Amino acid sequence: MTFTLFLLLAVFVVLVLIDAPIAVALGLSAVVYLLVADTAPMIVVAQRSVAGIDSFTLLAIPLFVLAGLLMVHGGLAPRIIALCSAIVGKRTGGMAIVMVVACLLFGSLSGSGVADVVAIGTMMVPAMRERGYDPGFSASALGCAGSLGTVIPPSIVLIVYGTVTGTSVGQLFVSGIVPGLLLGLGLMAVAWLQSYRNGWSGGDPFSWMRLRKTFREAFLALLAPIIIVGGIRTGLFTPTEAAGIGVAYALFIGLFVYRALDWATVAKLLRETTEITGAILLVIAAASIFGWVLAAERVPQLAVSGITQATDSTTVALLIMMGILLVLGTFMESIAIILILAPVFLPILGHYGVDPVYFGILMTVNLAIGANTPPLGIDLMAACRVARISLASAFGHLVPFLAVMIAVLVLMILFPGIVTGLPSMFQ
């Protein structure tokens, strides 16, 4: 390792440890590198920042963020929860299972783990508390279930990965469906088992009349992901255009059908979208500079050489990369990890003949685990805030949920068809 590369990584690690914003850590460490190494003029910082966000595909991010916010405030989330509750009924662990299913369904609308956690958690956690569920259990289940919003389409994380690696966002969306459902089933199994041990049950008894009523009311909400993902897969529109369709659909339903939105709320959501998008694009711009420096220091080539010399096995190579991601996911945000490591891992995938789309789903599932792993665990932190408990209060209930998510990740490595099977059917 050269001195300048060591300096780059040291400055970055120190800034992360002192809790500097990730965009500042990425950008400032790259600037320090350029000042010391003197390998390129400082104008590179501006050039790479602009180049990093100069992508039509990235326009989907603010549009999907806005669509998700419109759906949260437009009355779609309560109807989804009511439908899930009608399906599950009063069985053991019913409310926890409802929360997981609702997170799965709403994740297919919002594309964001934190949005999923807040939208579903603010309604489900108080109701679960009234039914006797432990708040630590509720927060753990909510955080892990909410993170499925980063796996199933239309995931913002998958959009960023597709942009960075040049892979098809539409293929990534379809590839994430089965793993997302499998993760959801695993989380439901853990929720049922934990609830069975503690005697936690569901809400109202099952009723066909109630099911029909809630299905009719939630039908338009359920139609949104079908329009978005189906339109992309059939080639009717690009992911960016699909995001625009999602905004128009959510706006129409919220204003004129459910009548839960007004123009003052829409204006507020536009401001919130601007703030969220600005933060995401600032990270992407800073990561573009950081990635350029890593490429200048030949880090991708060094990574390829190191892993290929360590093993000839594709499975072992994938496990090594997954281990690295699991460690980084405990203290770094998902988008930042993708922006830094996806370009580094891409040559390794080429050496072993691994499909970047397949790896993208592995990486996203891994980061969903990291989003619930302390000390950062951004989805778990959001869930604990919703439940109004400390992060430590959730730890005792967290391990089984993380264990089943890791088990699904290992299954995906051992049996790639879990990821590649559905996309191959559409080819």
Image (cartoon, helix red, strand yellow):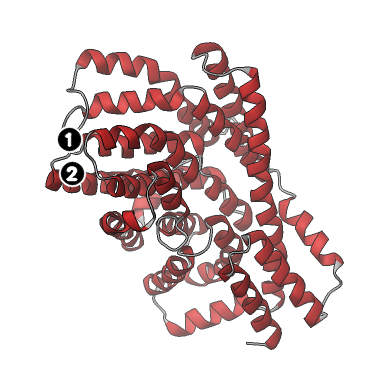
Q: Using the image as rendered, state which of residue 134 and residue 91 is in the foreground.
A: 134
Name the amino acid type tagged 2.
Ser
**In this figure, which residue is indicated by the disc labeled 1?**
201
In the rendered structure, find residue 110 and report the number of the disc placed on it: none
Q: Secondary structure at mark 2?
A: helix
| Above/below status of 355 relative to 99 | below
Kind of residue at badge 1: Ser
Measure the alpha-carbon separation of dots 2 and 1: 7 Å
Q: Determine whether, in the image, residue 79 is placed left or right of residue 270.
A: left
What residue did someone put label 2 on? 195
Secondary structure found at label 1: loop
Residue at horizontal 17 percent and vertical 29 percent from the top? 90
Compared to 41, does 22 lie above or below? above
Cβ atoms at labels 2 and 1 below 8 Å apart? yes
Residue 14 location in percent, x, y? Answer: 61, 74
Question: Which image quadrant: the N terminus?
Answer: bottom right
Q: Can see residue 147?
A: no
